[in-house]
Image: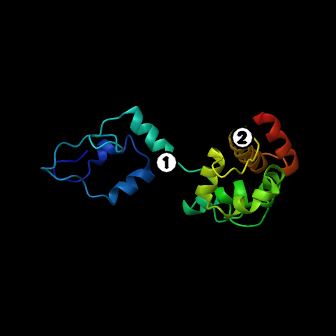
């Protein structure tokens, strides 16, 4: 991909790459002689060879595309969460802090456990609830499943509301979650 003078060989690159990509390459210095041959490779492995394991690892690092993440990637100019019109659309807000999601959790979590449910950091909240370590789902043998299904239903309903015309109904979602997890 480098010509005899050590510059990019545009005649070899241009048939394969878009104008936008070519403009980005202009800012990258070409490889220098003595550094080895110029060949494509898989960037997620030190030896540059593709493996299913590294592909899974690369994909599992992807984030759910909330408005907060869209703004971070310069894909949107608003972090607002359209379901409740209150706050930044982060994963935590969508699954836990939004008034609509809160309505779902308040119908499922025993009142005596709500303060613990609310006081945990987001990461601990997810971990504690999935494992039911803190006993948030008191007397509920299916709490782990019910919690995971409810998170999934909240996210799915959020997507259906944003990309379709489905209304986010917290009470109905809580009832459906209880049935779906059983």
Closer to the camera: disc 2 or disc 1?
Answer: 2
Image spot of residue 112 (x, y percent):
79, 58
Hey, which quadrant is residue 121 in on the image? bottom right
Please report whichever mark, 2 or 1, sits nearer to the chain's N-terminal start.
1
Tell me residue 57's x, y (percent).
44, 42
Q: Which of 57 and 37 is in front in this view?
A: 57
> Looking at the picture, does residue 166 appear above or below residue 122?
above
Question: Seen in the image, is 174 located left or right of residue 35?
Answer: right
Work out whether 45 lies above or below 75: above
Q: Is residue 130 rendered to the left or right of residue 179?
A: left
- Residue 51 image-quadrant placement: top left
Circle 2 Cα neighbour tier, 10 Å, few/some/many (<14 / 14–19 / ≥20): some
Callout 2: SS: helix
| Quadrant position of the C terminus in the picture | top right
Residue at 30% across, 48% down: 10
Q: Name the residue under label 1.
A: 61
Q: Give the residue drawn at x 71%, y 64%.
A: 80
Query: In the image, is 4 to the left or to the right of 175?
Result: left
The x and y percentages for residue 35 are: 16, 49
| 80 and 137: which is toward the camera | 137
Quarter placement of the N terminus: top left
Q: Which residue is drawn at 39% across and 39% down?
A: 54
Counting labels gives: 2
Task: Determine contact: label 2, label 1, CB under 8 Å.
Answer: no
Disc 1 on helix, strand or loop?
Answer: loop
Depth check, front residue: 7 or 54:
54
The residue that disc 2 covers is 149
Picture coordinates of residue 159, whole percent (x, y): 73, 47
Q: Can residue 83 be seen in this view?
A: no
- Asked whether the viewer can see residue 92, the reply is yes
Q: Of the numbered discs in the image, which one, if any, rests on residue 146?
A: none
């Amino acid at each position: 991909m480098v010509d005899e003078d050590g510059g990019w060989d545009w005649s070899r690159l241009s048939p394969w790459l878009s104008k936008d990509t070519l403009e980005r390459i202009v800012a990258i210095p070409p490889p220098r002689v003595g550094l080895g041959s110029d060949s494509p490779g898989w960037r997620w492995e030190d030896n540059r060879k593709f493996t299913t394991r590294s592909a899974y690892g690369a994909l599992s690092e992807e984030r759910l595309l909330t408005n907060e993440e869209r703004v971070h990637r310069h894909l949107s100019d608003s972090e607002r969460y359209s379901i409740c019109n209150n706050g930044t659309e982060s994963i935590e807000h969508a699954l836990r802090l939004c008034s609509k999601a809160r309505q779902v959790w308040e119908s499922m979590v025993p009142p005596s456990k709500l303060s613990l449910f609310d006081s945990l950091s987001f990461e601990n909240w997810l971990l504690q609830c999935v494992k039911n370590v803190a006993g948030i789902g008191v007397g509920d043998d299916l709490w782990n499943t019910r919690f995971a299904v409810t998170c999934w239903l909240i996210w799915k309903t959020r997507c259906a509301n944003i990309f379709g015309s489905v209304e986010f109904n917290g009470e109905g979602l809580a009832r459906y979650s209880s049935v779906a997890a059983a």
